[in-house]
Amino acid sequence: MTLIKLAANVTASAPLLGLAAFGAAALSGIGHRWVDILAQFTSPVLLAAVGVTVVCLLFRLWPASIVGGLACVVLALSVWPQWTPAKGVPVPDQPIVRIYSANLYVFNTDVAAMRRSIAAADADILVLVELGQAPASRLDQLLPDYPHRVLIGQARAGDHARSIIASRYPILQRLPERPDGLSTVGATVQTPIGPINVFGVHLTRPWPFQYQWGQISQVMALAERMKAAPAHPVIAAGDFNSVSSARIGKQIQSDLGLIPAPGWPGTWPSQIPAFAGITIDQVYRSPDLALITRCLGEPTGSDHRPVITEFTRARPPR
């Protein structure tokens, strides 16, 4: 191997090892904030590792290609849980309930885009967080087909973000709110497959963008709200500011017993192609519901993409 070839292999291997560190962080199971922030980005990092590895193969940098292949394997293993969670086994011949969930971004004034996206989804239940002043003042125009609504308001840093559950089906009750620091709207909706407790969740951003215990304490608060709600199947949707395979996603699955919908393609940021994004806009379900489909909705003018999911009753485990 010539000196130039050796230098090229070393130069290419160094960033590949750095990319592999993201996957190792996610697989480590360590919940420390420094590790958790790396685990959020395994999906786009996998894409980057594949690209660098392909370049190495084209230039016949075989040692670097081997390093790249190993990095891709580590990253693929780390994103697999968020891409392929269990969907459950649906009960045959049951009705299907379609959910549309979206972070609309509080300063987004493109109400026409929101309405087009909602109309195209043709969902039964809407879960909208970061509903700003512009759409909130025109709810009857934005949601003409959703007469049953539960809305909460939130004043934060000069803005007026709101969260809403809107439904074509009757809302049996508004689930109680608590002074627990959690921005969540909850309602029990009477659907064709029975009552469902629907939570519209918006967690704070992760450390270092917000205080490090914020998300953890908010998930604990969500657990308490779920315990206080009637004993019905649960759907928790919204902006969780975390991928399902990182610390907060694992906490939700272990402590709340909820199962995430698949996290690919990504929901954020909407300015880049969805295949390169990360899914921080989650839809979690209780095991008595089965996921039928998950896809992304039409643009709303927000930096988040909406998520459309379909559910039905699940067969009990044998």
Image: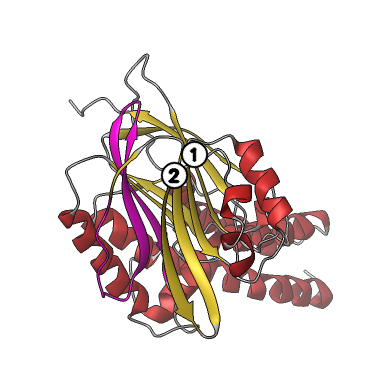
Residue 43 location in percent, x, y?
A: 57, 58
In the structure shown, which secondary structural element does the residue marked by tag 2 occupy?
Answer: loop
Number of numbered discs on residues: 2
Q: Which label number is shown at residue 309?
A: 1
Q: Which residues are magenta?
A: 174-203
Label 1 sits on what residue type?
Answer: Thr
In the structure shown, which secondary structural element does the residue marked by tag 1 occupy?
Answer: strand
Majority secondary structure of magenta residues: strand
Q: Looking at this view, is 23 or 177 the one in front?
A: 177
- The local crowd at label 2, few if under 14, some if 14 to 19, many if 20 or more residues have their Cα within 10 Å, is many
Q: Looking at this view, is 141 or 175 the one in front?
A: 141
Q: State how the image is colored.
A: secondary structure
Label 2 sits on what residue type?
Answer: Ala
Q: Quadrant of the N terminus?
A: bottom right
Q: Which label number is shown at residue 101?
A: none
Q: Is residue 149 left or right of residue 187?
A: right
Question: Disc 2, disc 1: CB below 8 Å?
Answer: yes
Q: Is residue 93 left or right of residue 12?
A: left
Quadrant of res 194: top left
Residue 151 in view here: yes
Identify the residue shown where x is 39% and y is 79%: 33
Q: Disc 2 designates what residue?
A: 261
Q: Is residue 199 magenta?
A: yes
Q: Is residue 286 magenta?
A: no
Residue 265 in view here: no
Q: Is residue 180 left or right of residue 170?
A: left
